[in-house]
């Protein structure tokens, strides 16, 4: 599985969690995808950049450290977290076509 495949996999998982208004820990993401917690942020950065570029709510804001309850500082400032999560939860992710492997490949080049 390529890096872009893993990013697509995470996108789908996050869109479903957002639809269900669930916050996921990095540990949850590891359990569900097999991607080690220490590496998952690498893929989340790609998703965060994609959301920002396409003016979407920050989907990665619902991914948090289980100890702090906060996203990685590389993904979001603490003062913005709750508003960002609210925007993610009300956005209709299922009405939007999910990015494909090719979308992430084009975006990262």
Image: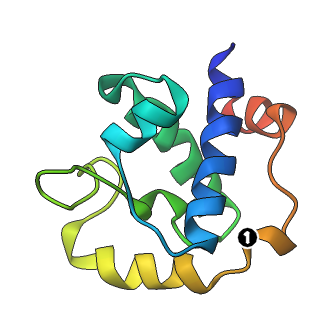
**Relative vertical location of residue 34 with respect to residue 107 in this rendering, above or below:** above
Q: How many marks?
A: 1
**Relative vertical location of residue 61 with respect to residue 19 in this rendering, above or below:** above
Callout 1: 10 Å neighbours few (<14), some, many (20+)? some
Q: Where is residue 87 drawn, in percent x and y? A: 52, 83
Residue 39, image quadrant: top left
Please give the name of the residue rendered at 39% of the width and 36% of the height, measured from the top-left corner.
41
Residue identifier under label 1 = 93
Q: Where is residue 43 drawn, in percent x and y? A: 51, 34
Query: Which quarter of the image is occupied by the N terminus?
Result: top right
Please give the name of the residue rendered at 21% of the width and 77% of the height, measured from the top-left corner.
79
Query: Which quarter of the image is occupied by the C terminus?
Result: top right
**Relative vertical location of residue 8 with respect to residue 35 in this rendering, above or below:** below
Please give the name of the residue rendered at 63% of the width and 72% of the height, measured from the top-left corner.
19
Q: Nearer the viewer, residue 109 or 51?
A: 51
Q: Nearer the viewer, residue 82 or 26?
A: 26
Please give left or right for residue 96 compared with residue 104 in the image: right
Q: Nearer the viewer, residue 11 or 20?
A: 20
Outermost residue to the left: 67
Residue 30, image quadrant: top left
Please give left or right for residue 8 compared with residue 30 in the image: right
Q: Where is residue 29 drawn, in percent x and y? A: 44, 39
* Scheme of colours in the image: rainbow
**Disc 1 element:** helix
Residue 24, image quadrant: bottom left
**Relative vertical location of residue 99 with respect to residue 22 in this rendering, above or below:** above
Please give left or right for residue 39 compared with residue 69 in the image: right
Q: Where is residue 68 drawn, in percent x and y? A: 12, 57
Please give the name of the residue rendered at 73% of the width and 39% of the height, measured from the top-left corner.
107
């Amino acid at each position: 599985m390529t890096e872009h495949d893993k990013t697509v996999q995470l996108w789908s998982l996050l869109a479903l969690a957002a639809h269900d208004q669930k916050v996921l820990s990095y540990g949850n993401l590891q359990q569900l995808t097999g991607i080690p917690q220490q590496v998952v942020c690498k893929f989340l950065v790609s998703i965060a950049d994609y959301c920002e570029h396409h003016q979407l709510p920050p989907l990665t804001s619902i991914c948090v450290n289980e100890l702090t309850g906060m996203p990685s500082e590389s993904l979001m400032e603490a003062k913005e977290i709750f508003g960002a999560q609210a925007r993610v939860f009300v956005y209709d992710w299922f009405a939007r076509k999910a990015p494909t492997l090719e979308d992430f490949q084009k975006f990262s080049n």
